[in-house]
Image: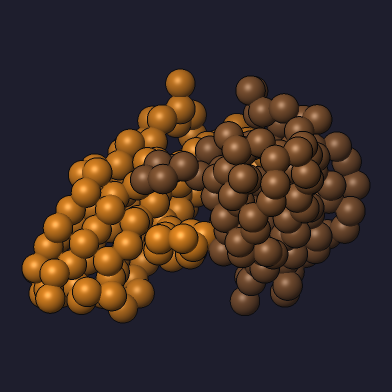
Chain colours: A brown, B orange
Amino acid sequence: GAVVSQHPSRVICKSGTSVKIECRSLDFQATTMFWYRQFPKQSLMLMATSNEGSKATYEQGVEKDKFLINHASLTLSTLTVTSAHPEDSSFYICSARGHGDSPLHFGNGTRLTVT
Amino acid sequence: EDQVTQSPEALRLQEGESSSLNCSYTVSGLRGLFWYRQDPGKGPEFLFTLYSAGEEKEKERLKATLTKKESFLHITAPKPEDSATYLCAVHPGYSSASKIIFGSGTRLSIRP
């Protein structure tokens, strides 16, 4: 149980274009979903927290107009990287949590390369 | 300030050589401590949740323990397939909405 599916696993896009990443909880309802960014050999950096039906809460230093998050249902959250630039190239990982004290379950990540 | 510190940063073991990874935490209360395994290019895979001091959880060659200040992940007779980065995360105790804090991980390498 507790499977989180993230798509796509890899994406290459040109500078200036937008990319959408989907995160779905397949067998549980996720009241809260989280988006992380991970640099090589570093730990997870929380970008934003989203609750179903409400606006996402962004961490300090994360541009909300560049990283648009939508949590339209209890099983789906999307991250759109708008007007991507090479410095946005990274590994993005989503996670989902059912009730408040349950562990986070992670998707398999999306490797974004902006050329 | 809430903190989670993992040690060592990296650990190389021979196959069959048992060892322990450490996760020290300083938080205002503890709602839960989690261990994850992360393979290169993948998302973290959930291993264990520990909620109170004295609690232990086991899965195959892994055993996680918890005290009021730290958690250990004991690896018994590891195999090469146990090579991965192991992440510790803490859910502080003010409310269920408080953010989970991750340690920087221990990169474990098991030589055949």
Q: Position of residue B30 (x, y in %)?
A: 48, 40
On the question of residue B1 being in view, the answer is: yes
Name the one closer to the observer, B13 or B96. B13
User: In the rendered image of this protein, does residue B71 appear above or below residue B101?
Assistant: below
Spot occupied by residue A52 in the image (x, y as percentages of width and height) = 85, 50
On the image, the x and y values in percent for residue B26 come to 38, 30
Residue in front for this viewpoint, B4 or A46: A46
Residue A67's place in the image compared with B54, above or below, is above
Reply above or below: A64 against A114.
above
Give the residue drawn at x 74%, y 64%: A24
Name the image quarter holding the N terminus of chain A. Answer: bottom right
User: Residue A103's image quarter?
Assistant: bottom right
Image quadrant in which the C terminus of chain A is located: top right
Is residue A35 rendered to the left or right of residue B12?
right
Q: Can the viewer see residue A105?
A: no
Residue displayed at 74% across by 42% down: A81
| B43 vs B2, nearest the viewer | B43
Number of numbered discs on residues: 0
